Amino acid sequence: MIRETMDQVIEFARCGHFETIDITGGAPELHPDLGNFIKSVSPYASKTILRSNLTALPRKLNHLVDILKESQTTIVASFPSLNEVQLESFRGKGSFQSSIDTLKTLNEMGYGKEKTGLELDLVVNPSGSFLPPSQIETENRFHRIIKQKWDIRFNRLYTFANVPLGRFRTWLVKSGNFENYMEKLISAFNPCAIKGLMCRNLVSVSWDGYLFDCDFNQAAGLFLGKQKTHVSEIKNPPEPGTPIAVGNHCFTCTAGSGFT
């Protein structure tokens, strides 16, 4: 994202009166101007979130620590497995220990600890073509094991199903698992999840400044309101009742507990 687009996003946040600013990627830590962006955008929302896969963050923490603390930015970290072999099978050699070290550093900064106001949340995705286990049971297990083994603390854990888009979709098709996986998502449809779907109260801005109903629609190329609108062309969030673009991948967000 170029600086001009970042400034346009900041202006959109100022006018839009959003509750939360959620910064994601790719790896947003790799952007050289991330610190200034957080400092500029965080005053315009009650909560700021920075999403990380814990592999790029260590190189930036020294430059970001004061900004993250001052803005009380929540860190949502992807930590898909407590098993080293399993995690490194899709993150690469050395990524497990690097992630553990980064979580320890975040704890030292105050993240994940009580009464600091610095929230550290973890996200777990299944590594194959199956749905995630119970969020409550998984969170309790992670709290117990990650403290016993590494004395690491965190606030919350979220379990999400993998969305059949991008590389995961390609793997599903190549491995012959696509149809079975879609059947699992569809059969797990939960009408109670619809009310809280994130696409109903979220606006996703792509790296080049175009608007989408959610990050998954961004990946699928389905524009907000089914028309290509740039962040510089809009001042306020879409009106309630504005149609939401949908596709087969949306069954992911209505499976089980859903994406809220």
Image (cartoon, rainbow, N blue to C red):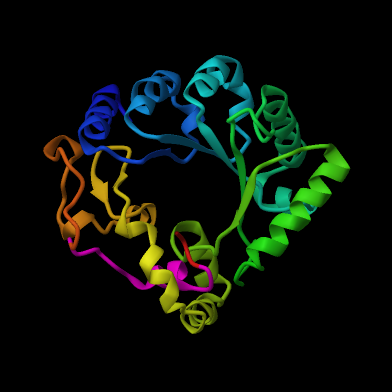
| Up/down of 13 relative to 216, above or below | above
Who's the residue at 59% across and 41% down the image? 53
Q: Is residue 259 left or right of residue 58?
A: left
In the image, is 228 to the left or to the right of 185? Answer: left
Q: Residue at x 79, y 53 (%)?
A: 83
Residue range (magenta)? 242-257
Residue 88 rendering spot, x and y as whole percentages = 72, 48
**Residue at image point 35% right, 41% down:** 19
Q: Is residue 220 left or right of residue 224?
A: right
Instruction: Kindly tell me whether residue 55 is visible in this rendering.
Output: yes
Q: Is residue 24 above or below residue 138?
A: above
Q: Residue at x 50, y 76 (%)?
A: 185
Residue at the front extreme of this rendering: 115
Between 102 and 76, the one lying in front of the other is: 76
| Quarter placement of the C terminus | bottom left
Left or right placement of residue 106 versus residue 259 in this view: right
Q: Position of residue 124 (x, y in %)?
A: 63, 55
